[in-house]
Amino acid sequence: MSQSIQLAERHENDGSAGLPSPISNEIVNHVHLLADEMPEGGYGWVVVASCSMIMFFAVGGFYSWGVIQAQLAAESIAPNSTLAFIGSLGVSLIAFCAIFMSRLIRWIGARNAGFLSCFLMGGGQILSSASSRNVSGLFVTNGIIVGLGTSMSFMLCSTLPSQYFKQKRGLANGAVYGAAGIGGAVLSIAQSALISRLGVAWTFRIVGAATIVLTFPACCFLKDRLRRSTAAIEWSLFLDPRFVMLALGSAIGTFPLLVPPFFLPLYTNSLGLTTSVGSVLLAVFNISSAVGRVSFGALCDVCGPITSLSLALILSALSLLAIWPVSSSLAPLIVFAILNGFGNGGFFSTIPSVVAHIYGPIRVTTVFSMVLTGWAAGYLLGAPVAGWLLDAYGGSGAGIVAYRPAMYYAGSLSVGSTGFILGVRVLTTKKNLFTFA
């Protein structure tokens, strides 16, 4: 099967695709048949479970960075904007390295990629323990090393389930991303408890060791179904207005994603609440994100992935613009954490389904890596820009008014992202109608 797929790709790229060749055409048809006949279960659920365990630590790790950031800020290690930049650097590598990671995963295979990525994530956390009071060291260990592992894990676990599902693809992706939200919730509470008892350094060591111990067994069950050697970049996609609008819309949508999880613990401190309340609130956000990832993933199978993505972005925008700015007490802040977490999670779980829906499961790794590369600026600068706005208006000690510019910045970008995704929906509907005709 793998040999047929690679031969078909060679036929498509060697310039002979326009010449009649019964053997080559038979191979190409066989590949598309393999892509269409999805198992819709079976070993696919084993793959989903394995990817879920990896995403628990990969995405859950950077969604719980706000707990570490709040503690380092309390110890006056660095300004809020600098500490947010450490977390966003690791996340931004998901985008910066997306195309490279997609090639590397196809070259070494899903199982080996899983082991390598989890070793980098766990090892980077352990090395961070030696740099817990050194900002430069944290940029290298928690920013770059953990970021590289997270990048590979994210690319692997975002695309592998699409090889096993078509009708239930949204549910499968939602389950994987839901585990990431649960990871953020569990790690937020666990890290808060560990910091209060053992300090930041030992928290890094314990989380790093747990990452390696719990993810390595999961990596043993990873298995490629449609392994295809493709071009790193399909330049013709830039002539497709659907791809351009999807890439732009999702790129803009990444700017506000990390603002709530990175700044909720600081915001609760500005309200005079305890640090433990901040970590619990972050856990609520992550639990809601987990529910949103599964719910919006399942919704993709009901009303379509593009519609589901649009609804997730609308929910995020409304919570950022209408609820967070007036959250001067715990009750409305909980409502904001639930609604924004729900929409936030929906963004992540629907994007792979949108790509697979438009371009098919065989091309999903290449196209998704290209879309993901466009997220680099949002991942890298989204939270730091909010931090700079906060510092410019008086800092975290100036009360909730100082946070509102950052809130409006994040909410307005969510609105802009929604507009582009709705444009993708219109173009896709028109194309389907034209094809049917």
Image (cartoon, rainbow, N blue to C red):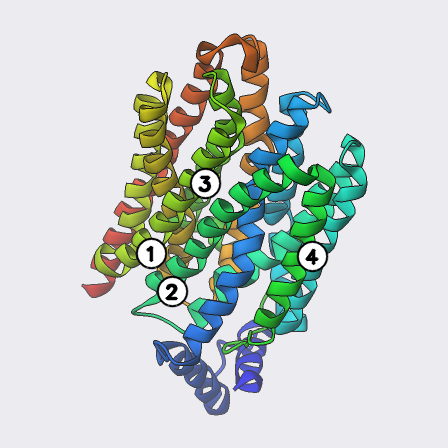
Residue 220: image location, x then y, percent: 60, 75
- The amino acid beneath tag 4 is Ala
Name the mark nearer the viewer: 3 or 1: 3
Disc ID at residue 297: 1
Labels 3 and 4: the sequence-earlier one: 4
Labels 2 and 3: the sequence-earlier one: 2
Dot 2 crowding, Cα within 10 Å, few <14, some 14–19, many 20+? many
Q: Is residue 104 above or below residue 411?
A: below
Name the mark nearer the viewer: 2 or 3: 3
Q: Quadrant of residue 217?
A: bottom right
Dot 3 crowding, Cα within 10 Å, few <14, some 14–19, many 20+? many
Q: Pointer 2 and pointer 1: residues touching (CB < 8 Å)? A: yes
- The amino acid beneath tag 2 is Ala
Residue at image location 39% in from the left, 35% down from the top: 417
Q: CA distance from mark 3 to mark 4?
A: 21 Å
The residue tagged 2 is 172
Work out which quarter of the rendered image holds the C terminus and state it.
Answer: bottom left
Of the pair 292 and 362, the residue shown nearer to us: 292
Residue 345: image location, x then y, percent: 40, 46
Disc ID at residue 283: 3
- The amino acid beneath tag 3 is Ala
Labels 2 and 1: the sequence-earlier one: 2
Q: Quadrant of residue 289?
A: top left
Q: Pointer 3 and pointer 4: residues touching (CB < 8 Å)? A: no
Q: CA distance from mark 4 to mark 1?
A: 31 Å
Q: Is residue 387 above or below residue 347?
A: above
The residue tagged 4 is 209
Labels 4 and 1: the sequence-earlier one: 4
Q: CA distance from mark 3 to mark 1?
A: 21 Å
Residue at image location 50% in from the left, 81% down from the top: 19
